[in-house]
Image: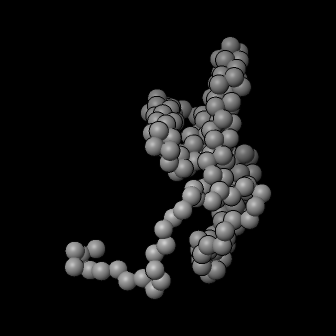
Amino acid sequence: MPPHATLRRSEPVRPVTGPAPRFAPSSPAPSSPALLSPGARRRARLAALAVGGFLVPWCVVLSATLPRTAQAHHWSLAWTGLDAAEAVAALATAALLARDDSRACLTATAGGALLMVDAWFDVCTSAPGLEHTLAVTEAVLVELPLACAAGWLAVRLFRRTG
């Protein structure tokens, strides 16, 4: 805002007394403007339905047509990128939590989703035998519990914002 601009209020500013009201998770949220207009919400819903409606049969096609094995030329880059994304999500969550920023619910959600993807692909791409046993063990004892913890944190932080 330019330095010469002034703000005008239609009603006087009232001082804040006491702590901000807290809302219990079961109580209705205070009235606030909708995040999306009805038209935008309708278009977004139709787009989500179209994507989901396309992907369900596409999964069937892929299941029937993809080869059982494939060679990936950028295998190490794919796994390094996934683990780097998990690290960024965890570090961003820690930084936001240090500032008591409720937006940490977004990075915790992303981190939890990445951990579930990591567990899924570790198990699905592991060789039979010891490698598969280790992948399942890591998924069950490390990745999935961390994903659940991240989900729990995200829900707690999201409820705090409401």
Residue at the image point whose x is 68% and y is 13% from the top: 130
**Residue placed most toward the observer, 103 or 50:** 103
Residue at the image point whose x is 63% and y is 41% from the top: 153
Residue at the image point whose x is 45% and y is 43% from the top: 99
Residue 152 falls in image quadrant: top right
Q: In which quadrant is the N terminus drawn? A: bottom left
Q: Residue furthest right?
A: 26
Q: In which quadrant is the C terminus drawn? A: bottom right
Total tally of numbered discs in the picture: 0
- Vertical comparison of 11 with 22: above or below: below
Residue 44: x %, y % from top left: 62, 71
Residue 158: x %, y % from top left: 63, 52
Please, which colouring scheme is shown? one colour
Q: Is residue 116 left or right of residue 95?
A: right
Residue 48 falls in image quadrant: bottom right
Q: Is residue 121 visible?
A: no
**Residue placed most toward the observer, 116 or 55:** 116
Residue at the image point whose x is 69% and y is 65% from the top: 29
Q: Is residue 119 left or right of residue 82?
A: right
Q: Residue furthest top?
A: 130
Residue 83: x %, y % from top left: 50, 32
Q: Is residue 104 visible?
A: yes
Residue 113 falls in image quadrant: top right
- Vertical comparison of 88 with 14: above or below: above
Residue 106: x %, y % from top left: 55, 49
